[in-house]
């Protein structure tokens, strides 16, 4: 997923996202939850998430922590809507597929 912060708010966006790390650490079914800075866009953050199945993703998405995060992000995101891409890994180094 690509999130684009308001100009100058990427660090605040990352701080809000980091609040999820202790939550996902204990979430059953959340295998990877990582953030990546876009080298070509100083306002963009990419999230890479991997779940064991659709039920794990649904549980994560419906969690109270996610509801809080979405509220926190409302003032930090720019005009560009989040870009979500759903994919299934086929081959990887460092991931169970």
Image (cartoon, rainbow, N blue to C red):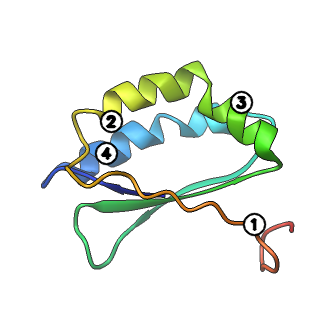
Task: Between label 2 and label 4, give the one nearer the viewer.
Answer: 2
CA–CA distance in space, label 2 to label 4 = 7 Å
Q: Which badge, 3 or 4, comes first in the chain's sequence?
A: 4
Pointer 1 residue? 88
CA–CA distance in space, label 3 to label 4 = 23 Å
Residue 13: image tag: 4
Does the residue at mark 2 contact the one at mark 4 (Cβ under 8 Å)?
Answer: yes
Q: Residue at x 28, y 33 (%)?
A: 74
Residue 34: image tag: none
Q: Is residue 29 above or below residue 63?
A: below
Pointer 2 residue? 73
Secondary structure beneath dot 1 equals loop
Secondary structure beneath dot 4 equals helix
> From the viewer's perspective, is 82 left or right of 4?
right
Q: Residue 52 placed where, x, y %? A: 82, 49
Q: Residue 55 placed where, x, y %? A: 80, 37
Q: Is residue 81 above or below residue 46?
A: above
CA–CA distance in space, label 1 to label 4 = 27 Å
Q: Which badge, 1 or 3, comes first in the chain's sequence?
A: 3
């Amino acid at each position: 997923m690509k999130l684009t912060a308001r100009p100058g708010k990427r660090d605040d966006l990352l701080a809000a996202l980091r609040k999820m790390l202790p939550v996902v650490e204990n979430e059953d079914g959340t295998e990877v939850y990582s953030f990546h800075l876009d080298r070509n866009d100083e306002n963009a953050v990419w999230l890479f998430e991997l779940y064991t199945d659709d039920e794990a993703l649904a549980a994560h998405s419906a969690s109270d922590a996610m509801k809080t995060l979405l509220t926190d992000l409302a003032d930090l995101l720019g005009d560009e809507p989040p870009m979500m891409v759903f994919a299934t890994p086929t081959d990887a180094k460092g991931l169970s597929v």
